[in-house]
Amino acid sequence: METLAVPDPVGELPARLDRTYELVERLDVGGMGQIFRAVHLLDGGVVALKLVRPSGREESRHGPSSPTYRLALALEFQTLASLHHPNIIRVLDYGFGMEKRPYFTMSLLEGAKPITE
């Protein structure tokens, strides 16, 4: 399996995630995880993919492989995906990739600036 030359707290990232997305480039890193430009392997659509980094508290209580933790995140992702408003980026898909790390995809806004700018 190919890996990206991107430092990651869990290790090297595969070029493909969950047999569904190809990670093309890392766009940003934040407190919740890393955001990548990704391509959906079935339809070729380009998306922003956020690979979520569990907080230490969540990992110690439930761990990313815990059914309780995964269910809570799945419900949160479903709620985000149900939101439809012109000022909210749409959540398109979610899942649990390598080592059961959660991720979700959003519409990719080219040239978007952080809210702080």
Image (tube, rainbow, N blue to C red):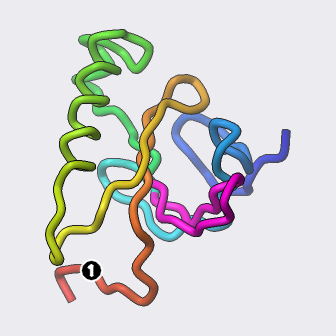
Residue identifier under label 1 = 114
Q: Would residue 29 appear left or right of 72 to someone viewing this image? A: right
Q: So how many labels did they put on this image?
A: 1
What residue is at 53 percent from the left and 62 percent from the top?
Answer: 36
Q: Position of residue 59 (x, y in %)?
A: 33, 20
Q: Position of residue 99 (x, y in %)?
A: 57, 24
Q: Nearer the viewer, residue 85 or 103?
A: 85
Q: Would residue 76 appear left or right of 25 to someone viewing this image? A: left
| Quadrant (top left/top right/bottom left/bottom right) for the N terminus | top right
What residue is at 60 percent from the left and 61 percent from the top?
Answer: 38
Q: Nearer the viewer, residue 61 or 97?
A: 97
| Residue 49 against residue 26 in the figure, above or below | above
What residue is at 58 percent from the left and 69 percent from the top?
Answer: 46
What residue is at 63 percent from the left and 56 percent from the top?
Answer: 40
| Residue 28 against residue 81 in the figure, above or below | below
The amino acid pointed to by label 1 is Pro
Q: Position of residue 18 (x, y in %)?
A: 63, 36
Q: Nearer the viewer, residue 110 or 54?
A: 110
Q: Nearer the viewer, residue 89 or 54?
A: 89
Q: Quadrant of residue 39?
A: bottom right
Q: Position of residue 105 (x, y in %)?
A: 44, 54
Q: Is residue 47 magenta?
A: yes
| Secondary structure mostly seen in the magenta stretch | strand
Classify mark 1: residues with Cα within 10 Å, few (<14), some (14-19) or many (20+).
few
What span is in magenta? Answer: 35-49
Q: Would residue 15 appear left or right of 62 to someone viewing this image? A: right
| Residue 78 against residue 111 in the figure, above or below | above
